[in-house]
Amino acid sequence: MGLFYFHYALKPGPLIVIALAAGASLLISELGLLAIVALVAIIALVSRYNLLVIERLASGELEAPAFTGALDGNSAPLLLKVVGMILVAGFVGFKLLPFGVGVFAVYVFILSVLAPAAMIVLALEHSLRAAINPLKLLQFTLIIGWPYWLLWLTTSAISAAPNLLLGVVAAKLPDWAIGPVVAATTTYFYTVTSAMMGYICLSRQQKLGIVAEPDEDSAYMEEEQFNRARALAEAQVLMRESDFKAARQALVDGLRRYPNDEALNERYYRLLLATQDTKALQELGPHILEKFVLFNRSHKAAELYLATKPAPPIKKPEIRHALAQILYQQHKHQLAAQLLINLHKENYPQLDAAYLLLAQVYMDGLNREDLAGKLLQFIKQKFPDSPLSSQVDSLWKVLNSAEDIS
């Protein structure tokens, strides 16, 4: 995943929050008694926004939320819950002090390990009781498994980055700039770690049981939509990181559950194009293109067909006909003709319509009026009662008129 999280924190939403944090630090240094109010307000806003980051990523939204999403009225209540978590942790630590430094050190270590889990639970459930329940947090870490330990190590290291950065640049900055730099870097890395927390929920959503079990059809559909969105989001992130193998596996897993999902099929086909997997495109391409035709998305099928080099072998006449219709509309006459030629060998029930289209292709794009005439004669002979007879006659008249003029 690597750079995704660091890029994520540079999107417009996070940048606005970072700028506000930096600007607020300047005001705090000048407002005197009002500094506490400004400090609490900006902490509330930053906390709310980063909890929103966790929540949105966990639901499959890869784009950073807009800054206005943090202005939903939940900033103060959530800040109070964060403060409540800190107070509960501090109270327990205070009670453990009489048992010795060793016990207290173990408690602090456990606290640091469970801190990411507590923030995630608070973001998803908005419940202080759940966020301070040690059994729930322990269960959370065990269900996720070793990726949680990697998350903890990574977030711990990244959380130390602002102090390290300040130690490097503090001597080179004027006094007035130190506050904004600290506020900006702290907010930036806070967003990075929040993105990591959100994504780990996205990748482990089913195991965590964050979404309630469906008890009626509408809930079932909502869970299906969530699972599809999660597969797409996970694949998109992995593709951005050029981890095409993992992205492909995520899409394959999604398609096994939802083989007729349009978005999953398109993303999978585009992944095959991006990785230039010619063998898979030749073998699987026709099947996926057929799905788009059946979805009544022939334009999308034609778009993907044109993007595939060499073109996948389309055998089913109805798919060839549908693709040729779109290609004719796009003035891709040669390709349309290639798809329609020799369809009479396939025992195709709509052969009259297909060959009428081929005649139009020959006349309008390839200047082969001789072949167009033969096709029209073929239709007249083989399909005397065709519902397209009037169109055949009209095209025949146009063809004869062109021959008379020439």
Image (spheres, rainbow, N blue to C red):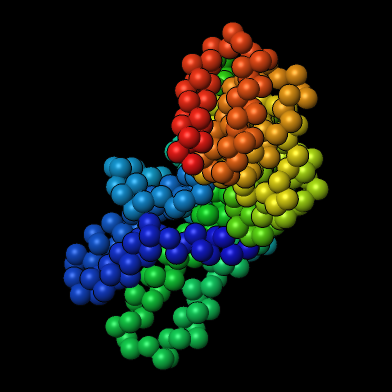
One can see residue 377 in this view: yes
Q: Quadrant of residue 45?
A: bottom left
Quarter the N terminus occupies: bottom right
Residue at 62% across, 45% down: 334
Q: Quadrant of residue 34?
A: bottom left
- Taking the image as shown, residue 138 lies to the left or right of residue 72, namely right
Residue lying at the far top in this picture: please name it: 385
**Above or below — where is 390 with respect to 39?**
above
Of 300 and 356, nearer the camera is 356
Give the percent coordinates (x, y) of residue 355: 63, 26
Residue at 53% across, 15% down: 389
Of 7 and 394, nearer the camera is 394
One can see residue 218 in this view: no
Residue at 70% across, 52% down: 309
Of 267 and 91, nearer the camera is 267
Give the percent coordinates (x, y) of residue 117: 58, 47
Number of dots carrying numbers:
0
Residue lying at the far bottom in this picture: please name it: 172
- Taking the image as shown, residue 354 lies to the left or right of residue 190, namely right
Give the percent coordinates (x, y) of residue 234: 62, 46
Residue at 34% across, 76% down: 179
Give the percent coordinates (x, y) of residue 161: 53, 73
**Above or below — where is 131 with respect to 174?**
above
**Above or below — where is 302 with respect to 189?**
above
Of 254 and 120, nearer the camera is 254
